[in-house]
Image (cartoon, helix red, strand yellow):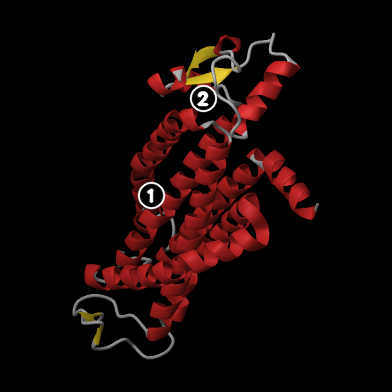
């Protein structure tokens, strides 16, 4: 019961741990006799769980790094899209109300489909397989976003209100129904892929540590993702401003170049995720085949 008195410690067997001792532990794990006459706690030694000890664990460290990289690229894209929609040069020049309506519609689709998509991917591909599929579907969504500039010139313009929100604000750019549907679809898919990848990474990382180590491991992962979330918005603002307002590119060329660059960054982060966790992906694939 010494472990109950200190939640920040873990038990690990010494080098003198014999097969007889291991058999005793197996019996206890199966609900066997836990009397002190049967189980000698002296065969264990205590190790304190620290940030450095978690970071020294290769598998856990790789999952934490991947979590930070994936989070950074997601926030980078998520912050760039509204700025693009708001921009009068190279963007759609939409009002904040219209942009908010688009984000609300994509969120509604995301909420309705999130469980269905994640459960389906987990059943079909497994934990690491779902992660691989999700990260590989993220960057094409980013690369396809500039097409909305062409799609917005087609079809009827949205007039009146959508769920009580006016999408035609005087003094701002207009939005066609096809463009509204396209943006909603692309942003919903991107959110779904990010949700699947994030959830899979959290579950996978927690598998690499014991129960007593999870609090420290998740704290370290949260630090990296928080750092990514704090840096990405500033980087996104610089990229959008340079692409659309610097004068280096024509507005339309700047918009396309911006999203192609973001797609390359997102694709690089996806490739790094698959590369870093390739060993785990191969192990899961082998187990599922058997």
Q: State whether residue 72 is above or below residue 99.
A: above
Query: Callout 1: few (<14), some (14-19), or many (20+) C-alpha neighbours within 10 Å?
Result: many
Q: Quadrant of residue 84?
A: bottom left
Residue 69 sits above or below residue 129 on the image: above
Please, which residue is most extreme toward the bottom here? Answer: 156
Q: Residue at x 64, y 38 (%)?
A: 276
Tell which tag, 2 or 1, sits nearer the viewer.
Answer: 2
Q: Position of residue 87 (x, y in %)?
A: 31, 64
Look at the image and tell me whether residue 207 can be seen.
yes
What residue sits right under mark 1 in the picture?
236
Q: Which residue is mark 2?
A: 54
- Please indicate whether residue 255 sits to the left or right of residue 173 in the image: right
Q: Which structural element holds mark 2?
A: helix
Q: Residue at x 53, y 45 (%)?
A: 203
Pick the front one: 147 or 68? 68
Q: Position of residue 92 (x, y in %)?
A: 34, 71
Q: Position of residue 108 (x, y in %)?
A: 36, 71
């Amino acid at each position: 019961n010494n472990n109950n008195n200190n939640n920040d410690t873990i038990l690990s067997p010494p080098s003198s741990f014999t097969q007889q001792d291991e058999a005793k532990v197996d019996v206890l794990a199966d609900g066997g006799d836990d009397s002190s006459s049967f189980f000698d706690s002296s065969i264990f030694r205590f190790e304190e769980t620290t940030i450095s000890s978690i970071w020294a664990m290769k598998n856990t460290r790789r999952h934490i790094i991947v979590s930070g990289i994936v989070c950074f690229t997601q926030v980078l894209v998520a912050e760039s899209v509204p700025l693009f929609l708001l921009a009068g040069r190279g963007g759609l020049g939409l009002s904040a109300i219209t942009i908010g309506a688009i984000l609300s519609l994509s969120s509604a689709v995301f909420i309705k489909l999130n469980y269905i998509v994640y459960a389906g991917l987990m059943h079909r591909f497994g934990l690491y397989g779902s992660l691989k599929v999700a990260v590989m579907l993220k960057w094409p969504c980013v690369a396809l976003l500039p097409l909305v500039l062409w799609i917005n010139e087609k079809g009827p313009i949205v007039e009146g209100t959508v769920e009580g929100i006016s999408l035609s604000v005087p003094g701002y750019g207009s939005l066609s129904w096809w463009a509204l549907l396209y943006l909603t679809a692309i942003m919903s898919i991107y959110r779904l892929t990010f949700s699947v990848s994030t959830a899979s990474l959290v579950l996978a990382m927690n598998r690499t540590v014991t129960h007593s180590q999870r609090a420290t491991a998740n704290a370290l992962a949260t630090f990296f993702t928080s750092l990514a979330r704090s840096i990405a918005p500033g980087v996104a603002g610089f990229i959008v401003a340079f692409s659309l307002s610097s004068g280096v590119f024509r507005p339309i060329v700047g918009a396309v170049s911006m999203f192609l660059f973001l797609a390359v960054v997102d694709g690089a982060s996806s490739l790094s995720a698959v590369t870093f966790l390739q060993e785990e992906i191969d192990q899961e694939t082998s187990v599922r085949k058997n």
